[in-house]
Amino acid sequence: MITVMDRTFLLIGSVLGFLGVAFGAFGAHALKSRLSPEMLGVFETGVRYQMYHAFAVLIVAAAIGHLGGARLLVIAGWFFVAGVILFSGSLYALALTGTGTLGIITPVGGLLFLIGWACLAVFAATK
């Protein structure tokens, strides 16, 4: 049976994947001649981690659909989403604006990714 949470995470994961492909193409084509190699690398790191975590959100959706909306699964999904916004979003903004202070946000997003993965691990270990 499809629930609200697995549909929500399926939608969010799909949108994150779609945007990851679009941003990757944008970086490879439109930004290649406009950004320094270093800033292009920063942008590409944002895309890469967005795609990794789009898949993580889709895994959460599948797990909820199969196992039910366990609290740790839902928490993991939201931490992945927040991590993409803060980690990848800050890297996109840093690459496009050159504002170095935005890099302060990136580790917070990385921490959110780690918490999401830890929630999945704890869920798996206790079920």
Image (tube, helix red, strand yellow):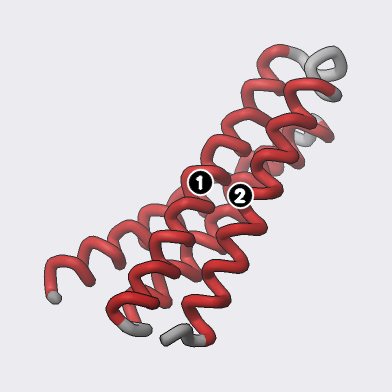
State how far apart marks 2 and 1 are (Cα): 22 Å
**13 in relation to 33, above or below:** below
Q: Is residue 64 left or right of residue 11?
A: left
* Closer mark to the observer between disc 2 and disc 1: 2
Instruction: Inspect the image, locate mark 2, and give the three-letter code of the amino acid beneath it.
Output: Gly
- Report the residue at 37% width, 54% height from top: 114
Residue 75, image quadrant:
bottom left
Q: Kindly identify which residue carries mark 2.
A: 17
Q: Which residue is mark 1?
A: 107
- Earlier in the chain: of badge 2 and badge 1, it is 2
- Provide residue 61's location: percent of width, then percent of height: 44, 69
Toward the viewer: 99 or 59? Answer: 59
Q: Nearer the viewer, residue 109 or 50?
A: 50
Q: Residue at x 37, y 76 (%)?
A: 64
Q: Residue at the spot x=75%, y=27% of the render?
A: 27
The quadrant where residue 126 appears: bottom left
Residue at (66, 58) in percent of width and height: 15
Quadrant of residue 99 in the image? top right
